[in-house]
Amino acid sequence: MSSCCDGGSCEKPGTSGGQGACPRCGAVGRVVGDETVRSIVKPGRAEGLLAVERRFCRTPTCAVLYYGADGLVVEKSAAAVRVGVKETEDPVPLCYCFGFTHADVRRQVAERGDSDIPARITAEVRAGRCACEVKNPSGACCLGEVNAAVKQAREDLARRLSAV
Ligand SMILES: [Zn+2]
């Protein structure tokens, strides 16, 4: 077993004969549970994906949302929510449990140079109020994505300030 989901190495195509790889883009996605598929995919579209191993494709340019070990795929149009990693226009959801978007992070960073959103999410998570398995299409906690978005926004801001 590898610790595939640490550090974004999920983007790499699988090396073991394509096992676990998205049939469209070749990236190896994260395994998601039935509860995630059932709550994210629109009613009537999820059934075929249950009962086999299915994974979430996080490649931004790939239209595949979930794919099964049996080759079945559902595209992001089957999702009842906007899939943040695959959206380029606002609103781009970052945190599904508490409703923060990329725009919220960018606005905070523009106003005060930093964002308290990661800390607010951390506090909510500690209080047991998150539900990533059923709200986030990836089925995973959003904090990694949120921290990356804050870092990106701060770098963009620094670049803009040094350009004037
Ligand atoms: Zn894909």
Image: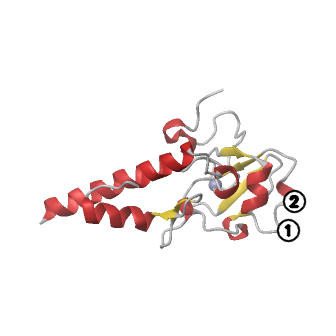
Ligand 1 closer than 8 Å to label 1 CB:
no
Seen in the picture, residue 122 relative to 104 is either above or below; the reply is: above
x 21%, y 58%: residue: 159
Q: Answer yes or no: is residue 66 visible.
A: yes
Q: Which mark is residue 47?
A: 2
For label 2, the SS is: helix
x 60%, y 60%: residue: 62
User: In this rendering, would 48 be left or right of 6?
Assistant: right
For label 1, the SS is: loop
Q: For the residues labelled 1 and 2, say whether their Cβ atoms are less than 8 Å apart.
A: yes
Q: Answer yes or no: is residue 73 visible.
A: no
Residue 139 at x, y percent in the picture: 66, 50
Residue to which mark 1 is pinned: 44
Q: What's the CA distance linking mark 1 and mark 2?
A: 6 Å
Q: Name the image quarter holding the N terminus.
A: top right
x 35%, y 56%: residue: 115
User: In this rendering, would 87 be left or right of 32?
Assistant: left
Going by the numbered disc 2, the residue's amino acid type is: Glu
User: In this rendering, would 114 be left or right of 89?
Assistant: left
Colouring convention used in this rendered image of the protein: secondary structure
Taking the view exactly as shown, the residue that stands out farthest to the front is 127
Between 56 and 90, the one nearer to me in the picture: 90
